[in-house]
Amino acid sequence: MKLLFKPSFERIYKKLPASEKAAVNKRVEELFDYYNKDVLFAGLRVRKISGKDNYFEIDTESNRRILIRKNMKLIEFIAYGNHDEIRRFLRSY
């Protein structure tokens, strides 16, 4: 499984404090391990976004979410934010 970080995600990620970056990195690593090694972490909460094909959100420890799109062999990291920011992003994307 390959990971692709879209510019929209990278712009947000660069502005995060170190503690939030650590939480995001942890989720990215857990997701990568899940798809490549079939290791399911109890705290990895991935939910499909209704009405959007192949779009999912992952909860982080800081009550924020990572928006991803999953294709056959590729996971695209698209955005990061709270519930309202992700919904707003999806409407404009």
Image (cartoon, rainbow, N blue to C red):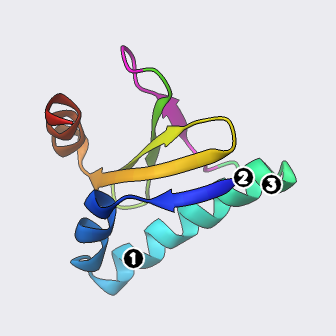
Q: CA distance from mark 2 to mark 1?
A: 22 Å
Q: Residues within 10 Å of mark 2 (few under 14, many from 20)?
A: few
Residue type for callout 1: Lys
Q: Earlier in the sequence, mark 3 or mark 1?
A: 1
Q: Callout 3 environment at 10 Å: few (<14), some (14 to 19), or many (20+)?
A: few
Residue at mark 1? 21
Magenta-highlighted residues: 43-52
Q: Earlier in the sequence, mark 2 or mark 1?
A: 2
Asked if the residues shown at circle 2 and circle 3 are in contact, with their CB atoms under 8 angstroms apart, the answer is yes
Considering the whole magenta stretch, tell me its main secondary structure: loop
Give the residue drawn at x 75%, y 48%: 35
Q: Is residue 12 left or right of residue 4?
A: left
Name the residue at 59% across, 36% down. Answer: 71
Whole-percent x, y for residue 27 in the image: 55, 61
The residue to which callout 2 is attached is 1
Q: Whole-percent x and y of residue 40?
A: 76, 48
Residue tagged by mark 3? 36
First along the sequence among labels 2 and 3: 2
Q: Is residue 17 above or below residue 69?
A: below
Discs 3/1, front:
3
Residue 33 percent location from the top left of the image: 75, 59
When asked about the image quadrant of residue 72, the answer is: top right
Residue 64 appearing in the image: no
Residue type (three-letter) at the residue carrying disc 2: Met
How far apart marks 3 and 1 lie (CA) works out to 22 Å
Q: Quadrant of the C terminus?
A: top left
* Number of numbered callouts drawn: 3
Could you say where residue 28 lies in the image, as x and y percent from the top left? 56, 62
